[in-house]
Amino acid sequence: MDYSGKIVVITGASSGIGKESALEFAKLHASVVLVSRDRNKLEEVTKELLKYQTRILVCACDISQKDQVNEMSKQVLEKFGTVDVLVNNAGFGIYGNSNDLKVEEIESQMRTNYLGMVYCTKTFLPKMLEQKSGHIINVASVAASFGIPGMAGYCASKFAMLGYSESLYHELKGSGVGITVVSPIMVRTNFFNHNSFNNMPRYTTTLSANTVAKTVVRAASSPRLEIVVPQFVRIAIWFKHTFPYLINPIVGQIFRRSKTN
């Protein structure tokens, strides 16, 4: 697909899935808006994008701060006049038992992972509805469907993202604007660099950020509510939703056992 003339806004674009998504959209000739708190890292990503001869806008923005999101959206619309694809990718996790985590640590995950997504969606959605076209992609996680011990704050934020997206999916029917959630499992990114993960069991991270980024690009023209990566994990989610009284005890036992190994 050729994205020439299309404006793609990507949060959390300084590394990982966000950075790789920016590269994939740039290859398709999209104009890319890079959003992250770290301007220096965004400038480094910009250097990699220049070879694709596409228009780039760098916006240093903490999406957990509503005022900063509003200012960022003004910059985007002043420069480009529109937005065609919004990729809500920014997010982070903190590992630890709920009883041990500070309330502020749980709140910070919800502010970035969930409310940051809401702020960005609310600020760009009116323009999409006005032009009767556009697509919102929310990068969640398989943790949006499974409560993982030690990740309650993170899982709660992703459950919230999926629920918000599902409601919005129904509201947007017939508007010309779509929304798709991309839910990967265990991606090899700097997500696990937070020092709290030093105490986390070492699960296998099988997905590359680029694999998920290619799914993000595919999601931009998908009519589906959710795309799980890899697809076979959808079976586990189906079993969990269909037979929760059987699956939940098994899942809980697996995670608890891994924490003691």
Image: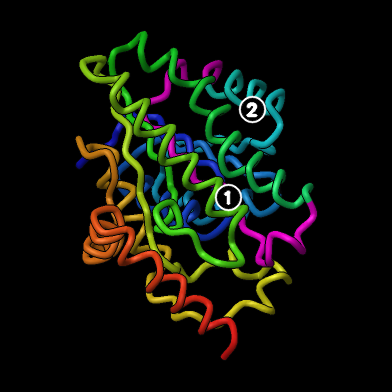
Instruction: Give the extent of the magenta segment.
Output: 77-102
- Left or right of 259? Residue 204 is left
Q: Quarter of the image containing the N terminus?
A: top left
Identify the residue position indicated by label 2 in the image: 69
What amino acid does circle 2 point to?
A: Val
Q: Amino acid at mark 1?
A: Gly
Mark 2 lies on a secondary structure that is helix
Q: Position of residue 131 (x, y in %)?
A: 33, 11
Task: Give me the residue at 32% from left, 58% from top.
Answer: 244
| Label 1 CA crowd tier, 10 Å (few <14, some 14–19, many 20+) | many
In this picture, is 194 found above or below 31? below
Residue 214 in the magenta stretch? The answer is: no
Q: Is residue 110 above or below residue 155?
A: above
Q: Quadrant of the C terminus?
A: bottom right
- Residue drawn at (69%, 38%) of the image: 62
The image quarter containing residue 63 is top right
